[in-house]
């Protein structure tokens, strides 16, 4: 029953991760720490999930209704490769886990494109093309930043990366890599300040209500969680740590990255498409290439 | 087979999600939704200012694909691997600079 | 993995690959076409996974999802009706009202078409390639032999759009389909009758490591040549994309 346990692991991680992420994000952005708020959020969510998402007469039914299931399916598969602890559940056998994860990010963008275009609304299509622009610009620096960790771990498996960080966290001697990873994550997961496709007049979720919209928002939280989790795994040592059990360290490190990004989203104004594209191509990508060279040199010298 | 769980997850979650949505949308569109958001259609030919950037992405996508296996084998192969990637990255860097100088990023 | 499960997955993925390609050919929406082709390629990536070719599966998905997204962007830029709204996918509301027999006069603001005033009671037929050919009964166009299509206000206006040819079909559909079938049958026969070399599967391997080592030894020249190829593409894209 290995398949079922793995699948259950991913789904459970999805549920818990999304819940924690949403809670943390709301808490930081609205400075509310009261547990009553949590319960409110849950009931709101359940309410939304039960409401219908009919679209309107001129939607593209395949794209409109296919968007949310695709997004949710993509995030579930992404979480399959995130190692929460040394349990040998999903982790060890996925030897190209990191690559897998990057690939699934693409699917979320496809889902958002479908949602925006399928809605047959001017704002939706604008949002859809902003989504593609961001995906196309930020997946490259993300991939290059991750390459540094892959080089150090000598494997594309996320679990290997954790094992290889027995001594020093990768993030400590690849600070540029970690920084690029985090910045690129904003662009890839459409978190503020890089959330142009979710703004008022360029909004892929336009005409989506009820369950469909709720699922898409859940998927967005989920992908953000998975990105932070992957970042913690590749650069902050994952579940490794003294005294506390693995999963707890995992949660702490992921939460730290989430909190940092949440704060940044509150602090900075929303970026325009021009800023995001120029930032990615003229700063982030050259920096990430330089990072790979630096990491390569360091590794050669350390040998 | 390592990725057994990926299939049931992907198919299963997708199917359940799709079923949920389609079932919940069975009822007729409410009167207020009839007019839709706008008149006409949003699916029109539109200029996409970042088209050239999309093509550049394809080039770098290929570079990324080469980079991953290279990165895995890096330490096991030695200095030759470093120079290999240096040349590879330098060539693409030149391409990026060329695109920049030619105004591909002047949106 | 038990044979039953493997067979089920294989059949599902193979069907997905074929269905995706079929839907892509039949759809009138360019965006849908891109998505369906993406689905077809991802099904193939799934087949790679069934064969334990995990690295190639990931590469396939990454390349084709990215590629299809770029293709969709370009289709929106290049084709007059990227969403298929003139061709049956979610036709504009006004047209649907017309078909229900109302004789309202519609004024589509912000729309590029000229709506022509057409009574919905009489059905007219026109040739998609020759809009001036009209007939009250279905048949063939006297000029090109294409099947006449019923007019609707929307199509009408579209045909008047600077005389652009919006036809998605042409008179070679049937010969093309026949040639396609024959080619497919020949290929299938070739694939089935060939004696494919088979090697025992590796037990526990790291695709990334294997491919990486090959790239840095036997295929190093190809590795660097790929960089030259890529930069050629980049330069070409920049030159072609330059605005006058």
Image (tube, helix red, strand yellow):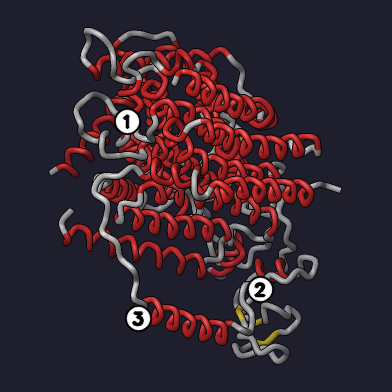
Residue identifier under label 2: C167
Mark linked to residue A82: 1
Q: Is residue B32 visible?
A: no
**Please, is residue B72 above or below residue A149 in the view?**
below
Q: Chain of mark 2?
A: C
Question: Which residue occupies the foreground of this view, C114 or C188?
Answer: C188
Q: Secondary structure at mark 1?
A: loop
Q: Secondary structure at mark 2?
A: loop
Residue furthest right as drawn: C244
| Residue at the image position 73 percent from the left and 84 percent from the top | C133
In the structure shown, which secondary structural element does the residue marked by tag 3 occupy? helix
Location of residue A67 in the rendering, given as x and y in whole percent from the top left corner: 43, 46
Which residue is at 74% across, 63% downward?
C114
Which of pointers 2 and 1 indicates the residue nearer the eye? 1
Q: Is residue A75 visible?
A: yes
Mark 2 → mark 1, Cα distance in angstroms: 49 Å
Along the horizontal axis of the image, is C1 left or right of C123? left
Q: Using the image, determine if residue A36 lies above or below residue A282.
A: above
- The front one of B84 and C191 is B84
Residue toward you, A217 or C103: A217
Residue that badge 3 annotates: C193
Between tags 3 and 1, which lies in front? 3
Chain letter for mark 3: C
Identity of the residue drawn at 77% across and 38% down: B98
Residue at the far left: name it: A1
Q: Give how far across and how far down residue A214 sits, in percent.
A: 38, 35
Q: Earlier in the sequence, mark 2 or mark 3?
A: 2
């Amino acid at each position: 029953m290995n398949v079922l346990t793995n699948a259950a692991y991913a789904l459970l991680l999805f549920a818990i991760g999304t819940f924690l992420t949403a809670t943390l994000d709301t808490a930081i952005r609205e400075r509310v720490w009261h547990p009553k708020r949590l319960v409110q959020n849950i009931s709101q969510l359940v309410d939304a999930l039960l409401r219908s998402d009919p679209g309107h007469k001129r939607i593209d039914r395949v794209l409109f209704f296919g968007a949310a299931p695709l997004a949710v399916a993509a995030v579930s598969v992404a979480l399959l490769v995130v190692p929460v602890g040394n349990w040998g559940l999903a982790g060890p056998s996925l030897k190209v886990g990191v690559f897998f994860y990057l690939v699934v990010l693409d699917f979320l963008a496809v889902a958002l494109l479908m949602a925006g275009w399928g809605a047959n609304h001017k704002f939706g299509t604008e949002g859809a093309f902003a989504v593609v622009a961001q995906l196309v610009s930020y997946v490259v620096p993300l991939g290059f930043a991750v390459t540094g960790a892959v080089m150090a771990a000598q494997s594309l498996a996320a679990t290997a990366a954790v094992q290889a960080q027995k001594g020093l966290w990768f993030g400590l001697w690849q600070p540029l890599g970690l920084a690029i990873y985090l910045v690129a994550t904003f662009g890839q997961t459409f978190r503020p300040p890089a959330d142009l496709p979710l703004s008022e007049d360029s909004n892929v979720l336009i005409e989506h209500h009820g369950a469909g919209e709720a699922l898409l928002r859940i998927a967005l939280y989920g992908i953000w969680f998975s990105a932070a989790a992957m970042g913690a795994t590749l650069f902050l040592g994952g579940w490794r740590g003294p005294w506390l059990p693995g999963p707890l360290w995992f949660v702490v490190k992921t939460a730290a990255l989430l909190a940092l990004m949440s704060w940044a989203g509150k602090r900075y104004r929303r970026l325009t498409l021009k800023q995001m594209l120029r930032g990615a191509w003229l700063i982030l990508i050259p920096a990430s290439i330089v990072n790979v060279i630096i990491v390569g040199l360091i590794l050669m010298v350390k040998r | 087979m390592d990725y057994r769980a990926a299939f049931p997850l992907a198919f299963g979650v997708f199917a359940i999600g799709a079923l949920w949505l389609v079932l919940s949308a069975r009822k007729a569109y409410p009167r207020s939704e009839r007019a839709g958001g706008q008149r006409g259609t949003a699916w029109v030919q539109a200029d996409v200012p970042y088209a050239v950037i999309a093509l550049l992405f394809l080039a770098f996508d290929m570079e990324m694909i080469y980079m991953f296996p290279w990165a895995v084998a890096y330490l096991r192969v030695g200095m030759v691997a470093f120079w290999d990637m240096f040349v590879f990255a330098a060539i693409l860097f030149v391409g990026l600079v060329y695109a920049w100088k030619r105004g591909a990023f002047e949106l | 993995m038990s044979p039953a499960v493997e067979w089920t997955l294989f059949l599902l993925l193979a069907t997905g690959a074929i269905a995706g390609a079929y839907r892509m050919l039949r759809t009138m929406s360019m965006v849908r076409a891109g998505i369906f082709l993406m689905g077809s390629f991802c099904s193939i990536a799934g087949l790679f996974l069934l064969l334990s070719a995990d690295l190639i599966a990931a590469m396939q998905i990454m390349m084709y999802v990215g590629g299809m997204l770029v293709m969709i962007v370009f289709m929106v830029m290049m084709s007059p009706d990227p969403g298929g709204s003139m061709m049956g996918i979610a036709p504009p509301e006004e047209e649907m009202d017309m078909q229900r027999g109302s004789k309202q006069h519609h004024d589509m603001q912000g729309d590029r078409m000229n709506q022509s005033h057409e009574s919905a009671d009489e059905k007219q037929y026109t040739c998609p390639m020759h809009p001036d050919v009209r007939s009250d009964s279905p048949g063939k166009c006297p000029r090109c032999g294409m099947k006449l299509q019923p007019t609707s206000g929307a199509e009408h206006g579209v045909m008047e759009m600077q005389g652009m040819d919006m036809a998605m079909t042409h008179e070679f559909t049937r010969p093309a389909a026949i040639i396609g079938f024959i080619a497919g049958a020949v290929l299938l026969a070739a694939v089935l009758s060939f004696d494919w070399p088979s090697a025992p599967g590796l037990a526990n391997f790291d695709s990334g490591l294997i491919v990486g080592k090959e790239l840095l030894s036997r295929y190093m020249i190809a590795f660097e040549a790929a960089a030259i190829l890529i930069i050629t593409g980049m330069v070409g894209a920049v030159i072609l994309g330059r605005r006058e």
